[in-house]
Amino acid sequence: MSNAILAASEKFETILNLGAKKRLAFMFETVQEFKQVWILNDEDGCVMLANEDDDCVPVWPERIYAEAWATGEWENCTAKAIPLKDWQSRWTPGLEQDDLLIAVFPTEEDDGTILFPDEFDSQLKAPKKRY
């Protein structure tokens, strides 16, 4: 395995093993840098999660993390990048109108951080914080 592939694999594992709060910071830093939010789609559209009494849209900072989550019942899903401008102009108001929450960077071990769409949007506009 090349050093670059090994380094990428180690970074991937390190990020996945961070706690939810640090993954949240990584999410916002990465989205601010690359100007896109990753979701999973199936034949019906955007994948949804049920969290207690609420439905959530799971989001990830990069394709690799979304694809890593797409196992089991989600294995036929495809990762899709939403440009940040589209997210803020269409997705945030649409999620609010539909009373949906956002599950930020879930992993196999936890559901990530659950935020209201306006909270997620305001964090995207905040200054970067290192994870």
Image: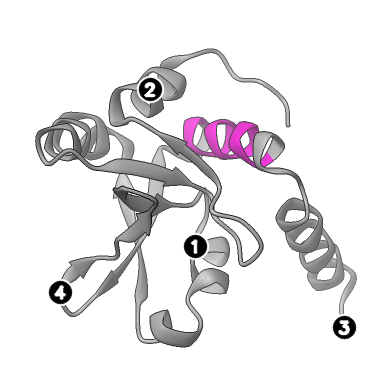
Among numbered discs 1 and 3, the one appearing first in the sequence: 3
- Closer-to-camera residue (8/109): 109
Question: In terms of secondary structure, where does tag 4 sit?
Answer: loop
The Cα atoms of the two marked residues, 2 and 1, are separated by: 23 Å
* Residue topped by disc 4: 44
Position of residue 101 relative to residue 58, above or below, is above
Q: Residue furthest top?
A: 127
The Cα atoms of the two marked residues, 3 and 2, are separated by: 41 Å
- In the rendered structure, which amino acid carries the disc numbered 4? Asp
Q: Which mark is residue 63?
A: 1
Image quadrant assignment for residue 124:
top left
> Which label lies toward us, 3 or 2?
2
The Cα atoms of the two marked residues, 3 and 4, are separated by: 38 Å
- Closer-to-camera residue (99/77): 99
* Residue topped by disc 3: 1
* Residue topped by disc 2: 119
